[in-house]
């Protein structure tokens, strides 16, 4: 089993990576392989809702890692997305990345456990968490929780690591995801996934 962790911070080795690494360590300790994917600091193209990915499952905009990450997520058993908090929200670059990662391509991600992790100096973390969790909730992905909201506080990686409660929250998150992955693995062949009804879309303006 393996979990993909997406580092949505422009700083590869910053606070977000410190939090993700702590969660990854707990997953590894429970026998789950991990990979941390850094989206980088280059500009990320926004989704334009062109629907060009509808047939191919690949975004028409290439070169910034979205299509590569989509293939990694299809092969992974679980997902953790990390982001710094900017102005009380998740970083714009990671939201643009996830918009394109999920738009019309989330079918293969169904039933894969997922979680969001955010890092902030002081405040805004819960709003950022809410923003990121919506990707999973719209994609039939079980949202994994911890002993507290999945957040770490600090202005530098060292400060983030000194947030002992935050680091413990990351380890608990990793352990909880490992447990859920093992439960899903044990249920395969014995408990079929839920049947899906044909999708119904209701527009309120007619």
Image: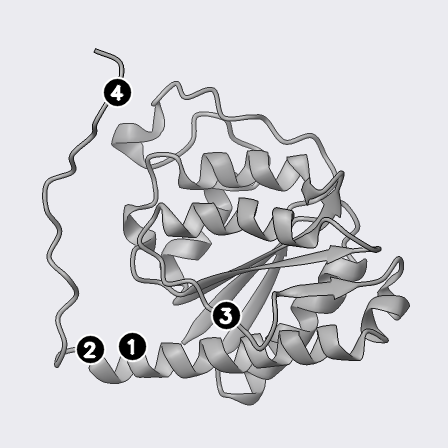
Check disc 1: other Cα within 10 Å, few if <14, some if 14-19, many if 20+: some
Per the image, the residue denoted by label 1 is 184
Q: Position of residue 6 (x, y in %)?
A: 59, 55
Dot in front, 4 or 1: 4
Q: Pointer 2 and pointer 3: residues touching (CB < 8 Å)?
A: no
Check disc 2: other Cα within 10 Å, few if <14, some if 14-19, many if 20+: few
Q: Earlier in the sequence, mark 4 or mark 3?
A: 3
Per the image, the residue denoted by label 2 is 188
Q: Earlier in the sequence, mark 4 or mark 2?
A: 2
Q: Pointer 4 and pointer 2: residues touching (CB < 8 Å)?
A: no
CA distance for labels 2 and 1: 6 Å
Check disc 3: other Cα within 10 Å, few if <14, some if 14-19, many if 20+: some
Question: In percent of the image, x 86 and y 76: which residue is there?
Answer: 162
Q: Pointer 4 and pointer 3: residues touching (CB < 8 Å)?
A: no
15 with respect to 76 (left or right):
right
CA distance for labels 2 and 3: 22 Å
> Disc 4 on helix, strand or loop?
loop
- What is the quadrant of residue 195 in the picture? bottom left
Vertical order, 122 against 86 (above or below): below
């Amino acid at each position: 089993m393996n979990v993909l962790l997406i580092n949505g911070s422009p700083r590869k080795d910053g606070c977000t990576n410190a939090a993700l690494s702590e969660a990854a360590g707990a997953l590894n300790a429970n026998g789950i392989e991990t990979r941390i994917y850094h989206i980088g600091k280059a500009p990320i193209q926004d989704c334009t809702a062109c629907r060009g990915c509808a047939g191919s499952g690949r975004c028409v905009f290439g070169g910034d890692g979205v299509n590569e990450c989509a293939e990694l997520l299809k092969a992974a058993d679980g997902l953790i997305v990390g982001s710094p908090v900017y102005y009380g929200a998740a970083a714009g670059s990671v939201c643009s990345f996830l918009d394109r990662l999920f738009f019309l391509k989330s079918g293969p991600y169904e039933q894969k456990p997922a979680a969001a992790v955010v890092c902030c100096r002081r405040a805004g973390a819960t709003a950022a968490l809410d923003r990121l969790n919506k990707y999973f909730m719209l994609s039939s992905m079980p949202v994994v929780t911890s002993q507290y909201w999945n957040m770490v506080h600090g202005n530098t990686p060292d400060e983030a690591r000194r947030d002992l409660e935050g680091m413990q929250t990351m380890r608990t998150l990793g352990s909880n995801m490992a447990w859920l992955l093992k439960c899903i693995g044990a249920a395969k062949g014995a408990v079929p996934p839920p049947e899906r009804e044909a999708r119904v879309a209701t527009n309120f303006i007619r």
